[in-house]
Image (cartoon, helix red, strand yellow):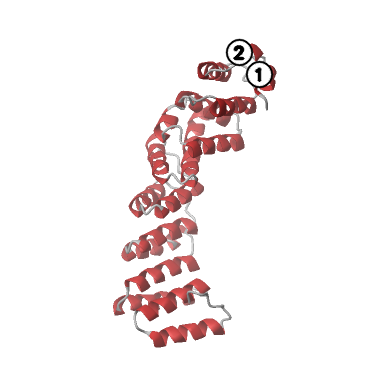
């Protein structure tokens, strides 16, 4: 929406004239966010985005915090989520400055909206490939709102981002902290941390996490076994290949059929460990099950 039209709808045509300055745009937004009744929030978001696009100086953390709080209090969650993702993508402020800027209040709406915004920020930063900032936001949310469990979506995105950034140490800490805060994990939560631990050779820890899956009312998936089998295959040696055989047996007994990835990992593992006879047998079994071999296989 053109700025003139927007300001006309808000009755503020005279507020900005000619070349708008950062101070004028920010002052206007601050005043509008504190007026009663509150102007249409989508219009205020448009003004904030116009300011970011046309003015060199970004909005202050205080203004961003006030805008996010107003969106949450009005239940405009899609718009709130969109604005949080914009903030995460452009990286204008640190997670701490944004979360500390949220208005403090004893009201029920404020006590609910603050942890919601914090959780959205973790998710947005993780998806914006800012894993360390996402982790900082996660820690701040834990510190400020310890009674509010993080969402499954935000934790899963955080774990995936940290594992992708080779910060499995932080991923493991976040995983265990999230469980202590009574999050509701799904199998993707477990598979992500298991995969990360296997990548860095912490197979015993990965196995312990896998054993906890059923305690949370979930069942291991083919991806769970693939990560563990791949980890032991890469480590190699008779003892580790014994673990591979046991995992494969456990997998089949659980009613999980090996996938093309499973067969590929097994064949490569047996070949690397000079057990070509077993690798050939696995390949034959794969063909019998009608699973096409990949180029790598």
Q: From where the camera sits, is residue 4 visible?
A: yes
Estimate the x, y position of residue 149 in percent, counting from the top left. Answer: 45, 43
Estimate the x, y position of residue 227 in percent, counting from the top left. Answer: 42, 66
Secondary structure at numbered mark 2: helix
Q: Residues within 10 Å of mark 1 (few under 14, many from 20)?
A: some
60 and 262: which one is in front?
A: 60
Q: Which sits earlier in the primary sequence, circle 2 or circle 1?
A: 1
Determine which quarter of the picture holds residue 13: top right
As displayed, is residue 292 above or below residue 141? below
Seen at 53% across and 30% down, the residue is: 68
Secondary structure at numbered mark 1: helix
Estimate the x, y position of residue 61 in percent, counting from the top left. Answer: 45, 26
As displayed, is residue 240 above or below residue 100? below
**In this picture, residue 198 sits left or right of residue 295:** left
As displayed, is residue 282 above or below residue 12? below
Task: Quadrant for the N terminus, please.
Answer: top right
Seen at 40% across and 57% down, the residue is: 193
Q: Residues within 10 Å of mark 2 (few under 14, many from 20)?
A: few
Residue position marked by numbered label 2 in the rendering: 15
Q: Which mark is residue 7?
A: 1
As displayed, is residue 194 above or below residue 13? below
- Is mark 2 in CB contact (under 8 Å) with mark 1? yes
């Amino acid at each position: 929406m053109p700025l003139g039209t927007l300001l006309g709808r808000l009755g503020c045509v005279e507020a900005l004239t000619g070349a708008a300055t950062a101070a004028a745009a920010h002052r206007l937004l601050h005043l509008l966010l504190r007026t009663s009744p509150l102007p249409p929030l989508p219009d205020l978001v448009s003004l904030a985005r116009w300011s970011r696009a046309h003015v060199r100086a970004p909005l202050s953390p205080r203004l961003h915090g006030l805008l996010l709080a107003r969106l949450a209090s009005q239940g405009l969650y899609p718009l709130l989520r969109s604005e949080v993702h914009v903030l995460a993508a452009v990286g204008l402020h640190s997670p701490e400055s944004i979360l500390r800027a949220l208005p403090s209040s004893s009201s029920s709406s404020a006590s609910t909206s603050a942890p919601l915004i914090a959780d959205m920020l973790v998710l947005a930063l993780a998806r914006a490939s800012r894993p360390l900032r996402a982790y900082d936001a996660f820690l701040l949310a834990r510190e400020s709102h310890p009674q509010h469990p993080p969402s499954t979506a935000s934790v899963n995105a955080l774990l995936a981002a940290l594992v992708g950034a080779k910060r499995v140490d932080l991923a493991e800490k976040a995983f265990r902290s999230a469980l202590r805060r009574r999050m509701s994990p799904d199998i993707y939560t477990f598979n992500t941390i298991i995969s990360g631990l296997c990548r860095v050779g912490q197979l015993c820890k990965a196995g312990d996490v896998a054993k906890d899956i059923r305690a949370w009312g979930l069942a291991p998936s083919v991806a769970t076994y693939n990560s563990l089998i791949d980890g032991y295959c890469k480590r190699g040696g008779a003892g580790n290949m014994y673990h591979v055989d046991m995992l494969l047996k456990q997998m089949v007994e659980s009613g999980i059929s090996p996938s093309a990835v499973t067969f590929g990992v097994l064949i490569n593992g047996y070949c690397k460990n000079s057990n070509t006879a077993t690798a050939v047998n696995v390949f034959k079994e794969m063909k019998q099950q009608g699973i096409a071999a990949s180029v790598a296989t």
